[in-house]
Amino acid sequence: MLQHAAARSEVGVFMDAVLLARIQFGFTISFHIIFPAITIGLASYLAVLEALWLATGRSVYMTLYRFWLRPFAVAFAMGVVSGIVMAYQFGTHWSGFSRFAGAITGPLLTYEVLTAFFLEAGFLGVMLFGLKRVGPGLHFLSTGVVALGTLISATWILASNSWMHTPQGHEIVNGAVVPVDWLRVVFNPSFPYRLSHMVVAAFVATALIVGGTGAWHLLKRRDSAPARTMMSMAMWMLLGAAPAQAVIGDLHGLNTLAHRPAKLAAMEGHWEAGLPGEGVPLILFGWPDMEAEEKRHAVEIPRLGSLILTHSWDGQIPALKDFPAADRPNATIVFWTFRLMVGLALLMIALACWGACLRPGGRLYENRCFLKCAVAMSPAGLAAILAGWATTEIGRQPWTVQGLLRTSEAASPHPAGQVAFTLGLFVVVYFAVFGAGTAYGLHLLAEDPADSAPDPEGGAGRASQAMRPLSAAQERGGHGH
């Protein structure tokens, strides 16, 4: 009996260490994912701004390019640093996962470095420091290549993560995964939906940040052409991307129903399978009780769940009780993170529609209530990304690789005390380092965008030379065109 008690104690301590390791990884990835999302969106935004400048010659676009280039550089640097730290954790806290799935995740992450990181690093210097040193065409090429690199990076990362959710194209040899078909590994069933969902989420989050920044300057009575232009462009992007994201999310939900039914049941707090023909209600709010295996205090709309989840009036979805208790995600957390993401998405669509209604007559730049809401919504895209990733990753539990490797098997056998110590260090260091970086980025956004106007010599690739006395005034005066 003493041996059994000691064994149970060791298992309990190890499970505590696994939970702490999960918290640490979740903490670090939450910091990390914010910065790549910003760089994906800002890189494409900068490419569009420079293209418009080259096509139209309007200096307002170059003013905005210069204004957003520094926040982009800050976000890019913090994304690289936080990403390197995450890569180390695979070897320190998740050695079981590395041994089991390293033959697939290792090459995919290597491809990301070879095709995306090197591409970005090669052209980033020209993008950041070559504005006056190279021709406008070459500088625009550098901006476009960096933007392309961020999208390629997202592609490889999402391919690796999607394979963990819907693995295929492999065999198990001596207790480890061996790839046999790389096309099936990369283009696994959930990959297209996850990639498009993440990239559009980055565009939406960036549009909200850009729009919120423009609104903040307009509220500060800096009613300039740069502030109006960034506000207008952001609202156009939000009007197109936010509804598109809702459509992609619906398709992603259908894919989850087909391949990850336990996760979908947890997202909906759906415990009991219904009778044929009665449909599934949509639970707006409630409390999925994991111990009692029931939903409490539910506010629901009859049959609407069937209509949304199966596109039929009486369709059924799997219930949590259809799966062994050991194979169920934590429905209490997943239920609420999913609703946070959807609720924020609905607010984004509402803000975009409101902006469209205010656009005639220039009221978009004058309605103070709308501008204040735009400022308040500026972090909503990042919050929705964090809620979405929590839904995705917690919804995969108790599996690290769905159906193949449990999280308890993937973790390294470290004592809980050691994991708790490193978690504490990460919390202190991350808040200090990335908190300072974020504060500096916000300081850059608070500067008047009109101060980023092009120099009198005229921009990329043009040598400095003596100019007529009123040249600078004419250039700056052109912002209002």
Image (cartoon, grey):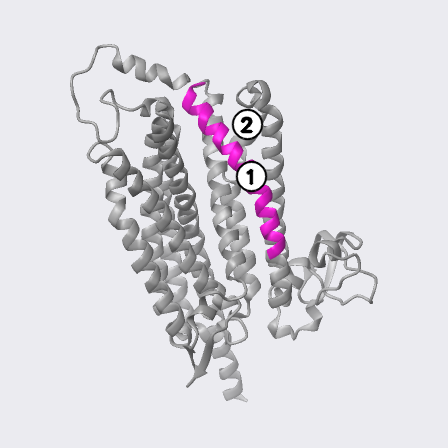
Q: Nearer the viewer, residue 4 or 86?
A: 86
Residue range highlighted in magenta: 223-251
Q: Which residue is mark 1?
A: 240
The residue carrying pointer 2 sits among few (fewer than 14), some (14 to 19) or many (20 or more) residues within 10 Å by Cα, namely some
Magenta-drawn stretch contains 336:
no
Q: Relative to 126, say whether 233 is above or below.
A: above
Q: Position of residue 423 (x, y in %)?
A: 40, 59
Q: Residue furthest top?
A: 469
Q: Position of residue 450 (x, y in %)?
A: 36, 22
Q: Nearer the viewer, residue 329 or 471?
A: 471
Q: Which quadrant is the C terminus positioned in?
A: top left
**Mark 2: amino acid:** Lys
Q: Secondary structure at mark 1?
A: helix
The quarter of the displayed image where residue 52 is located: top left
Magenta-drawn stretch contains 247:
yes
**Mark 1: amino acid:** Gly
Left or right of 33, for residue 429: left
Q: Which residue is mark 2?
A: 372
Q: Nearer the viewer, residue 420 or 156?
A: 156
